[in-house]
Image (cartoon, coloured by chain):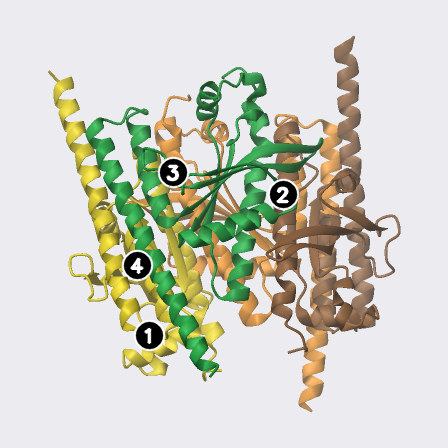
Chain colours: A orange, B brown, C green, D yellow
Amino acid sequence: MYGRDWETFLIPYEQAVEELKVKLRALRTELKRKEEYTPIEFVTGRVKKVSSIIEKAKILNIPLDEVEKVPDIAGLRIMCQFVEDMHRVAEHIRNRKDMVVVEERDYVTNRKPSGYRSYHFIVSYPVQTADGELELLAEVQIRTLAMNFWATIEHSLNYKYKGNIPANVRQRLVGAAEASFHLDNEMSQIREEILVAQILFETKSNT
Amino acid sequence: MYGRDWETFLIPYEQAVEELKVKLRALRTELKRKEEYTPIEFVTGRVKKVSSIIEKAKILNIPLDEVEKVPDIAGLRIMCQFVEDMHRVAEHIRNRKDMVVVEERDYVTNRKPSGYRSYHFIVSYPVQTADGELELLAEVQIRTLAMNFWATIEHSLNYKYKGNIPANVRQRLVGAAEASFHLDNEMSQIREEILVAQILFETKSNT
Amino acid sequence: MYGRDWETFLIPYEQAVEELKVKLRALRTELKRKEEYTPIEFVTGRVKKVSSIIEKAKILNIPLDEVEKVPDIAGLRIMCQFVEDMHRVAEHIRNRKDMVVVEERDYVTNRKPSGYRSYHFIVSYPVQTADGELELLAEVQIRTLAMNFWATIEHSLNYKYKGNIPANVRQRLVGAAEASFHLDNEMSQIREEILVAQILFETKSNT
Amino acid sequence: MYGRDWETFLIPYEQAVEELKVKLRALRTELKRKEEYTPIEFVTGRVKKVSSIIEKAKILNIPLDEVEKVPDIAGLRIMCQFVEDMHRVAEHIRNRKDMVVVEERDYVTNRKPSGYRSYHFIVSYPVQTADGELELLAEVQIRTLAMNFWATIEHSLNYKYKGNIPANVRQRLVGAAEASFHLDNEMSQIREEILVAQILFETKSNT
């Protein structure tokens, strides 16, 4: 179907997702063991469905014989507790030598009108296949749990309404996005309070 | 250490957690395939650390030679998008024939003063060991993503401050709990809006 | 295709295979930890392909609307180092309370003319679905590594020749089955030698 | 214990083993999907225990502060059905661009006196840690199922007798190694028979 051997085409993308899940989860484990605190809550990954790839190619004006230019066929998602953790994780992504960042989009500082917040990387990642090395694109999204919660529901609604979410539901979504943003702010303030408490404590301890 | 062969003692609990993770994830998969919507976002599980088991036994006044009465040595957690989904999942837990519910606690209707919200089951679950069947206790917690988000942070803070969270941080936590509660309410209202929209649509379609 | 919603039909079978893999691997882990030796090398599982289920139903004269009578839609395989271990594992299967053995076939004592050796159980296993409990059949095969090695190759050849393996290849297979049988015998003799050595050693130690 | 923070030291090795398992299994999956036959039966991996690392360092005259020179702290094992498959897999290892082969040992052509047969690679593999890239050594062993079967038992006996297997047991082991070698030969002959059969068939089909 869809005029191409999609199953074979997707093999290296599935491989990339599996490898990147293992690699990003290893970063989580390493930081947790060394610091007893990890900026990464959990990591998920998926290969885009064929029907969604075709749809996306259409939106991006990419002809189907150059479909490997669709940047999020392989997708990874990193969930963090705090907005501050997202920046630290982003820095780790930039420093890796097993992938090259080709694009960064900061939808946290600049939210989308829908209320969507997230930090996006497009990376170029080499996969070893039976026929040699293949360089492919993957998208890495970084989010707080609250951002992800909201985005999951927006995604369900978009799927349900096929992209045409009714005005009243969309308005509700903006309200929920506010609630999600507010929760992240509350959390950041707790985090700051803790850091201030620690500095006070350490200053006292040194005198 | 701790005067007992804890490693051997914990084997059946690890087994129970592995089995229950597989079983509860199967429920997720089944509902997703049949209804294209699942009330379960994801499922996690863990065996309590030995030091935490001993601490909990002390709090509950359970002598160490009856430590199997500590109800949450094996712990499972089910995360839902909506508060409404939690009730549906709870009903599935009650209907299962491979475990017996021995206790239910509804911290959603009756939140704890700290702001903690969650639905708790204690179940009795039979495990097959090399020496025969063993009936053991496990705790199953059901939460929304927002409840879980908040609880994760409270847990980190309790760990950091060894149970004595300072007053100002505790106050912030109550504020964050409010924000988490507010987010769940916003989400429930979106959900209702959708259901109303569907009923209107279906009524129209039938005329 | 094949006039039935096979995907939905197979959901509980996939669930059973996942649960039984976890349960049988737990037995492996438990014995390894307690005795530093385990009779189980590894455990695999699979759900039969739809085309193979239909083929098997035909061979067994089972009409497609009673296809749940095909006994190996859910299949588990337990690999052992020694033939002696197989009997111990078989005893564990018989003692479990989470499944009921409905049939046993001993192709070790009575090999098939092809050279096939293996121990087969058909068990009845209850699965909890969203709609209640479902009792289904599963096959549990117990093999040594050498038996499995041979059987894997016979399976490949049967697949390649669609059941009609040419006479000269079949003859070679019987030769290989002999070699596999011989290897198991050599291994059993090593095992005995070790046990004798231990008894001698322990007798000496006690004097 | 053992005068070093071994847990932290081993983190990148655990990471390497996880990554390489995923990568080598992906090769298995890719070949299976493209050719309906795979030279790889299964892949396992493990990090060496601390006590075994120290023992190995002693044998190799490596001081403990250069313990990263022990070449098999990270170990991968690839199991094949046929000896011929091993060579094909070895060629894939040599062609990969995500690791560099630093040593090859062919214990198949030149078996060890004990009867041990296997193909060994030492590779240098880069791991991304939170503190930057780390190049480490890993051992990749390639074996047939029969070679592995024998080696597993030799390993158990070496463990049991702490390296001093009694003469009569050792003699039995050589006998079992012969039986394992014989089984591999029988299998190779089946394989050849099949290939000859295919060539005959294809020649006929073309006339």
Which residue is painted at 47% across and 56% down in the image? Answer: C39
Give the amino acid at mark 3.
Answer: Ile
Q: Answer whether residue A135 is visible to the viewer in this image.
A: no
Circle 4 crowding by C-alpha within 10 Å: few under 14, some 14–19, many from 20: many
Q: Earlier in the sequence, mark 1 or mark 4?
A: 4
Residue in the image at 87% along x and 60% along y = B113
Q: Label 2: few (<14), some or many (≥20) within 10 Å?
A: some
| Residue beneath the point at 61% across and 45% down | B22
Q: Which residue is mark 2?
A: B25
Residue D146 visible (yes or no): yes
Look at label 2 and name its amino acid. Arg
Q: Chain of mark 3?
A: A
Q: CA distance from mark 3 to mark 1?
A: 45 Å
What amino acid type is highlighted by mark number 4?
A: Val
User: Mark 4 — residue?
Assistant: D140
In the figure, is residue A26 to the left or right of C172?
right
**In what element is the residue under mark 2?**
helix
Q: Are marks 4 and 2 on the same chain?
A: no
Apparent side of residue A27 relative to residue B24 in the rendered image (left or right): left
- Dividing the picture into quarters, in which one does residue A190 lie? bottom right
Taking the view exactly as shown, the residue that stands out farthest to the top is: B207
In this view, the residue farthest toward the bottom is A207
Classify mark 1: residues with Cα within 10 Å, few (<14), some (14-19) or many (20+).
few
Residue that badge 1 annotates: D163
- Please name which of the two marks, 2 or 3, marks the residue nearer to the observer: 2
D43 is higher (above) or lower (below) than B194: below
**How far, Cα to Cα, is label 4 from label 3?**
24 Å
Tell me the chain of label 4: D
Cα separation between marks 1 and 4: 23 Å
Residue B175 versus residue B64 in the image, above or below: above
Q: Which residue is mark 3?
A: A11
